[in-house]
Image (tube, helix red, strand yellow):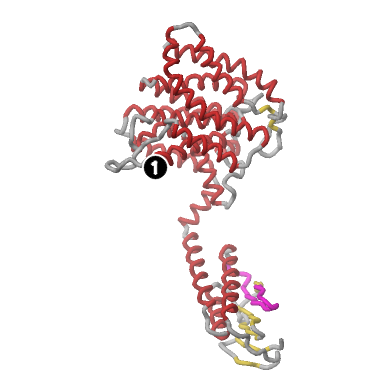
């Protein structure tokens, strides 16, 4: 207990002392976060060296504690090798983040550093070694994959949620305290000795990072906190080999993980790059609902605190009520996401439940069949018949086709009102024009696919023709087909 109190006191004091020193010295050497008026709305440039301050405070805490002439520090000496292994692996993530803060890295470069550190963590003994089902043999590759995905996911989750003063540091503090309490309950001394200094460093750092912040975490800090918490979660769950073992640590960091999953899904639905920044994170949606920055951050703190209690409850009841607790948490998350009113999810829900998604799938499937049938027609007359059938099938009222020196036309009926024209250019200045009534509904997605299907189908048909047919004078009627249809030859 004395060792725990010593580490806690040292980490808070050192963080309070070192953070302003790092901010006022290192912070001005290439680490300033400049406002842009869009995503970064702070009034002046702010140093993003919080990660450096936390690392120095964390390391200094252990250095001072080891130098103290107290017998209880023997426990720290015994746990030091495991803590050093964890620190060396985490330093790769930290340096990756610092480089990004200093010179700016591409997302792929950051991922290489994060996945590399996550892989090394597995070989250093930090593993999420679980089995999906009872009775199956151990699969080392599965444990490796789950460990890497878990650690990289936690690191990126805290990196993405770091968008408001005090948010990532405060959420990290709640999660760290949760894992500290779990370690004390489980009497897991190495985990307790690793988590307590981080909790103290984050608490001291929040003195300068809470709104209005005079220093930011930066990528070096947010990536490091997420990665360390992922490692702590793996250590927390290491005594069990069931999938439920990861439930408690997952709940402890569930808000950042939920935010990153929502962001990825939103960007996928909108066909945007996964790593493209935007203002659609949970804290941004709270601001849109009228929350002040402080109230939004405190609200997220409260949600994290509630989930922290739930995670400790899951840890206490083991497997008895874990399934029910997870179901209730998922239901609460779903209700919360609905309150945030994400337009992407609203539209996706309407498409699925309203049948629009099925109609799009049906239309695109028919377009694939139409293109295939068009490409396989035997001659130009069959090609024209297939074009006419597609015209009616996809809601057009008329069509005009100039192909291989011949002019085909089926004009819109007299009952049709005003219409607009869709022109598809073909090789040799030939074309196909489709006519559609202004009052007819149009799906832009299906319309684009229709153009592509016609163009590709005709090109494939032309490529399969052995010889070009003789061209005829433009005034000579060649044949007629169907009511309101005609075909003429024309001079080449």
Quarter in which the N terminus is drawn: top left
Left or right of 75, for residue 455? right
Residue 14, can we see it?
A: yes
In the image, what residue occupies the spot 53% across and 73% down?
A: 371
Whether residue 129 is situated above or below residue 316 in the rendered picture: below
The spot of residue 120 in percent (x, y) is: 48, 34
**Residue at x-position 69% and y-position 20%:** 24
Q: Is residue 81 found left or right of 52 in the rendered image? A: left
Image spot of residue 178 (x, y percent): 44, 25
**Which residues make up the magenta segment?**
423-441
Residue at the (36%, 35%) spot, across then down: 325
Vertical side of 152 occupied by 29: above or below: above
On the image, the x and y values in percent for residue 54 come to: 57, 23
Q: Residue 381 versus residue 239: which sits nearer the camera?
A: 239
Task: Please tell me in which quadrant of the rendered image residue 452 appears.
Answer: bottom right
Given residues 449 and 116, the one toward you in this image is 116
Q: In the drawing, does residue 118 fall left or right of residue 416?
A: left
- Judging from the image, what secondary structure is the residue with disc 1 in? helix
Q: Is residue 295 at all visible to an observer of this figure?
A: no
Relative placement, left or right, of 6 versus 325 is right
Which residue is outermost to the left?
135
- Where residue 284 appears, x then y in whole percent? 59, 38
- Quarter of the image where one finds residue 156: top right
The residue that appears at 52% across and 47% down in the rendered structure is: 265
Residue that extends furthest to the top in the rendered view of this protein: 69
Which residue position is annotated with label 1?
Answer: 142
**Quarter of the rendering containing residue 214:** top right
Q: Within 10 Å of the Cα at label 1, are there few (<14), some (14-19), or many (20+) other Cα atoms? A: some
Quarter of the rendering occupied by the C terminus:
bottom right
Answer above or below: position of 202 versus 333.
above
Tell whether position 426 is magenta: yes
């Amino acid at each position: 207990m004395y060792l725990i109190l010593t580490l806690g006191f040292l980490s808070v004091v050192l963080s309070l002392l070192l953070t302003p020193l790092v901010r006022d010295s290192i912070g001005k050497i290439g680490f300033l976060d400049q406002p842009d008026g869009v995503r970064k709305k702070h009034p002046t440039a702010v140093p993003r060296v919080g990660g450096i301050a936390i690392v120095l405070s964390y390391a200094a805490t252990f250095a001072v504690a080891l130098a103290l002439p107290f017998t209880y520090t023997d426990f720290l000496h015994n746990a030091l090798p495991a803590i050093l292994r964890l620190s060396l692996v985490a330093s790769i993530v930290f340096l990756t983040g610092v480089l990004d803060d200093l010179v700016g890295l591409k997302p792929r470069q950051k991922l290489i550093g994060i996945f590399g550190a996550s892989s090394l963590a597995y070989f250093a003994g930090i593993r999420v070694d679980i089995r999906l089902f009872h009775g199956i043999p151990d699969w080392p590759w599965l444990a490796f994959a789950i460990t890497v995905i878990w650690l990289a996911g936690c690191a990126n989750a805290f990196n993405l949620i770091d968008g408001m003063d005090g948010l990532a540091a405060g959420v990290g503090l709640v999660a760290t305290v949760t894992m500290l309490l779990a370690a004390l309950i489980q009497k897991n001394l190495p985990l307790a000795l690793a988590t307590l200094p981080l909790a103290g460093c984050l608490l001291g750092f929040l003195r300068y990072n809470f709104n209005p912040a005079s220093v930011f975490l930066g990528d070096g800090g947010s990536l490091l906190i997420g990665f360390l918490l992922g490692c702590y979660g793996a250590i927390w769950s290491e005594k069990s080999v069931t999938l439920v073992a990861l439930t408690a640590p997952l709940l402890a960091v569930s808000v950042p993980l939920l935010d990153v999953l929502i962001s990825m899904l939103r960007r996928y639905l909108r066909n945007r790059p996964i790593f493209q920044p935007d203002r659609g994170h949970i804290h941004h949606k709270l601001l849109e609902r009228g929350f002040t920055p402080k109230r939004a951050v405190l609200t997220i703190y409260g949600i994290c605190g509630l989930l922290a209690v739930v995670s400790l409850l899951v840890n206490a009841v083991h497997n008895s009520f874990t399934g029910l607790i997870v179901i209730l948490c998922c239901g609460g998350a779903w209700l919360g996401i609905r309150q945030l009113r994400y337009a992407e999810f609203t539209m996706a829900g309407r498409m699925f439940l309203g049948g629009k998604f099925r109609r799009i799938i049906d239309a695109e499937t028919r377009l694939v069949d139409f293109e295939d049938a068009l490409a396989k027609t035997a001659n130009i007359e069959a090609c024209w018949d297939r074009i006419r059938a597609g015209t009616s099938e996809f809601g057009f009222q008329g069509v005009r086709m100039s192909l291989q020196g011949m002019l085909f036309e089926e004009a819109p009926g007299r009952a049709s009102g005003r219409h607009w024209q869709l022109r598809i250019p073909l090789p040799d200045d030939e074309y196909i024009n489709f006519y559609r009534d202004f009052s007819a509904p149009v799906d832009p997605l299906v319309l684009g696919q229709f153009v592509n299907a016609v163009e590709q189908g005709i090109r494939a048909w032309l490529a399969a023709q052995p010889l070009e047919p003789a061209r005829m004078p433009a005034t000579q009627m060649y044949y007629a087909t169907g009511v309101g249809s005609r075909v003429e030859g024309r001079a080449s």
